[in-house]
Image (cartoon, rainbow, N blue to C red):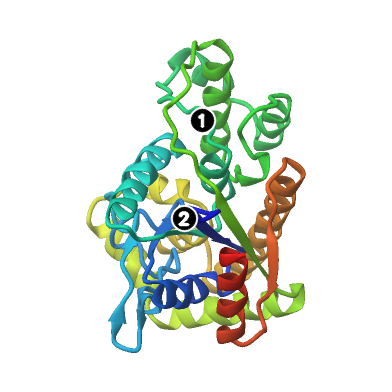
Amino acid sequence: MKKYNLITILGPTASGKTPLAAALAKRMDAEIISADSRQVYRRMDLGTGKDLEDYAIAGKQIPYHLIDICEPGYKYNVFEYQRDFLQAYEQIADKGKLPILCGGTGMYLESILKGYRLIPVPENAELRKSLEDKTLDELTEMLGKYKTLHNTTDVDTVKRAIRAIEIEEYYLHADAKEREFPHLESLVIGVDIDRELRRQKISRRLRQRLDEGMVDEVRGLLDEGIPAEDLIYYGLEYKYLTQYVIGEMEYDEMVRQLEIAIHQFAKRQMTWFRGMERRGIQIHWIDATRPMEEKVEEIIKMYNS
């Protein structure tokens, strides 16, 4: 009987976790379940850094799940993610294959690895009205007083902060029954990338995606009729690119601010992963710069030990 029934590969943006997960999946005949809160959206490809070509290795297509499952404009949440993960996990396990969970959305990863009880949270119009005049700083401070699920560092717009408070309030007063959760024993691998190298890769990748047409991607979504505020809600690339496309920001200023925001985001991801360790999840860190074959061998060795 194997000790593990799941391998998790996590890391900050631009750390190379997807190519590693794909190389491992090829060796182990496994399937990948994405843990990225924005890659669930169709036609949001460059801005979310989907890099779907990473899932094809030497002519073999690695099966992946929970990418391109929602329409843009929809507000997918961690409750739905947990439900969809369990469905994908069971499908893969039923085939006798190993699921590999791969991504950088800390809350999604932890909701699986810790088996949080999650329930859908309805909108609270009264609460929203009472919070609508507060600043992002005030809302973040309020959110910090709740001690359960939400990561205050992942709240980069007033709208998201209000939603996070709404969820926390609901959980305080709701009678949440424990969700049935399969017993998951995951080997958790973290891709450890030097801060300076990470910064270089983020900057290079941003320019590459801009050259590949990231602005046109956002323009196309707006032309489809997706409201600008819905795209801004997704944060990072979609926030800044939308502000540029609708004329609220000059191009050079947009690129400068977006680059800073992605660097800050990567730093927050690392803060979350360190928090996961403090909360009892053991992460085995592997140096991102090691040759791919070496990294894969080491993970297989740990998995079989």
Q: Judging from the image, what secondary structure is the residue with disc 2 in?
A: loop
Task: Please state which of residues 186 and 236 is positioned toward the viewer in this rendering.
Answer: 186
Residue 147, position as x, y percentages in the image: 70, 26
**Residue picked out by circle 1:** 163
Kind of residue sitting beneath label 1: Arg
Image position of 259 with respect to 225: above or below: below
Q: Residues within 10 Å of mark 1 (few under 14, many from 20)?
A: some
- Which label sits on residue 36? 2
Residue 230 lies left or right of residue 287; in this view the side is left
Residue at point 34%, 52% (across, down): 93
Q: CA distance from mark 1 to mark 2?
A: 19 Å
Task: Please state which of residues 156 and 18 is positioned toward the viewer in this rendering.
Answer: 18
Image position of 293 with respect to 182: above or below: below
Q: Quadrant of residue 138?
A: top right
Kind of residue sitting beneath label 2: Asp
Residue 14 in view here = no
